[in-house]
Structures are given as structure tokens and as C-alpha cells.
Image: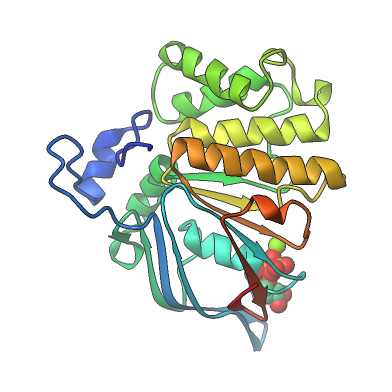
Amino acid sequence: MAPVVAALPNAGAVAEIAPVDNLSGTSAVRPAALEMASVVLRHRDGADEVVALDGIDLTVGSGELVVIIGPSGSGKSSLLAVAGALLRPTSGTVRIAGTELGSLRRRQLSALRRDRIGFIFQTGGLFPSLTALEQLLLVAEVAGQKAAPHRDRAEQLLRDVGLGSRLDHRPDQLSGGERQRVAVARALMGRPALLLADEPTASLDRSRSAEMVELLAEQTHRHGAATVLVTHDPDGLSHADRVLTLVDGRLTEA
Ligand SMILES: Nc1ncnc2c1ncn2[C@@H]1O[C@H](COP(=O)(O)OP(=O)(O)O)[C@@H](O)[C@H]1O
Ligand SMILES: [Mg+2]
């Protein structure tokens, strides 16, 4: 299982938000990585209001892959934005690794995003001029650390996602599926408690799509992150630990 305090980023910044005791083992019950309770999100759209999330209750444990399937406009991206501390909900509570987000200031929210959460987006979001290995090392640099000590881990993560022979390739030298594998490895670089993937298979064909979900399941179980993958694509769901459906901002069991 991944340590509660991320080893790579600035662990001090995390401890300031949520003191944890990894060494003495006194914390017998570890909180779920993600707990959302009665979460409502309303977007203001001119004079109108859109209810994007309409009472979401969702708990995801460490090492669990939850896939949420829903049509376009059902609130998938809104759900991940709230779970990922990018948007504050209109009402309800969100906890990440036991820390309630409502009580945090903006600076603390951004530290928490950096230190606890890995994001994977539809098109990967890789930097065009960087090699696969450099995409991962950039995570260390953004956290204010030297890249060199993290090189072995970055190479290992890329080997784990099947890219051992592509370390020095730039995005334009990789296939769509390979680019998404780099995005997965990069999201794991900071040892996130929570991994959020917004339609990561949207640009992939059917068999690559299923492979992507399988890879996320594998990596979730190996690294002990709690992973939420949202998609409109029913391929590869057999690899999920749990499948939920989102319709009009409401979650139901699939
Ligand atoms: N920034 C915004 N302002 C106003 N309405 C929004 C905004 N973002 C999303 N919405 C609306 O909220 C609903 C859910 O959107 P979204 O979470 O993007 O769904 P999905 O990712 O499932 O397509 C939609 O009706 C959408 O139009
Ligand atoms: Mg979306």
C-alpha cells in the first residue's frame, strides 16, 4: 500500500494539513481515500442555474478502482472537479484521506492537490517537447525537488506501464494508447492517495480502451491509490472493482 504521506512531494506541507502517524502504527483505522457526502454542485449559467451534482454520496477506499459511467452532461467532470479539490461544492462535504476540504484555504487546497491527487485527462495533457521520462521528472521539479534522485522510480513506473523501451520518446513519437500510459505513470509519480481519470479512453479504439482500464486497475491495486475513472464508454468495465452509473447528477449502482 502507498504510504499515507506522499514521499515525493513536500511531505511537510501535507503534515501541516493532516497530521498522520505512519511510524508508530497507532492509527488502526485508516480513513477512506475519498469520502463525498450529500454533495450538491450548482453552476450558474447566465440567469439560470444548472444542478450538475444532485446529492452525491461516494466513498472510495485505498486500492479500489471505481468506474462511473454516464452520458455527456451527466456531471462526470463536475464530480471529478469536486473530488479533486478543483471546485468547491455548493453544499455537502468532501474528505480526502480524512481531511475535510471545506476547512482548507486555497493555498492548502493546492498543496493537497499536488501532494495527494493524481489527475489523468482525456487527451493525456503531456508537454509536447518533453520525453516520456522528462514528463515524470517534471513532477518532482514542480514539487521543488531535484529530478535526479527520482529517476529510478520514474523509469520503473514507465516500465510498469509497458513503456520501458520508450523512455526517450516525445508525445509525437508515441501512439495514443502509449501517451495515455505516460499520463498514468506521471499521475502515479507523486504517490497519490487519490487518482482521478476523466474519460481517459475517449481518444482510443475499443481494445486500447479496455487495456487502459485494465492498466488502471492493475496500477490501482499495486500502488494502493483510490481511483475514480469516469467515462461514457462501457468497454473494459470488467476490470473495475465497482461500477456506478451517473444520470443527471445522481449516482446509482450499475
Ligand atoms: N462552468 C459551467 N457553467 C455552467 N454550467 C456548467 C459548467 N460546467 C458544467 N456545466 C453543466 O453541468 C452539467 C454537467 O456537466 P459536466 O460535469 O461537464 O458533465 P459530463 O462531464 O458528464 O459531460 C451540464 O449540464 C453542463 O452543461
Ligand atoms: Mg466531462
Q: Residue 68, position in %: x, y?
A: 63, 64
Ligand 2 is located in which of the four quadrants? bottom right
Q: Residue 210, position in %: x, y?
A: 76, 46
Instruction: Quarter of the image for the N terminus: give it.
Output: top left
Which residue is the extreme one toward the right? 205
**Is 213 above or below relative to 228?**
above
Instruction: Quarter of the image for the C terminus: give it.
Output: bottom right
Q: Residue 215, position in %: x, y?
A: 65, 38
| Towards the viewer: 113 or 24 | 24
User: To which quarter of the image does residue 157 belong?
Assistant: top right
Q: Name the residue located 25 percent from the left edge and 50 percent from the top edge.
A: 17
| Towards the viewer: 112 or 1 | 1
| Towards the viewer: 201 or 171 | 201
**Is 66 above or below relative to 248?**
above
Which residue is the extreme one toward the bottom? 47
Q: Is residue 195 left or right of residue 146?
A: right
Q: Is residue 83 left or right of residue 166?
A: left
Q: Residue 177, position in %: x, y?
A: 78, 35
Which residue is the extreme one toward the front? 238
**Is 167 above or below relative to 76?**
above
User: To which quarter of the image does residue 184 belong?
Assistant: top right
Q: Is residue 96 left or right of residue 208?
A: left
Q: Name the residue located 37 percent from the left edge and 45 percent from the top edge.
A: 111
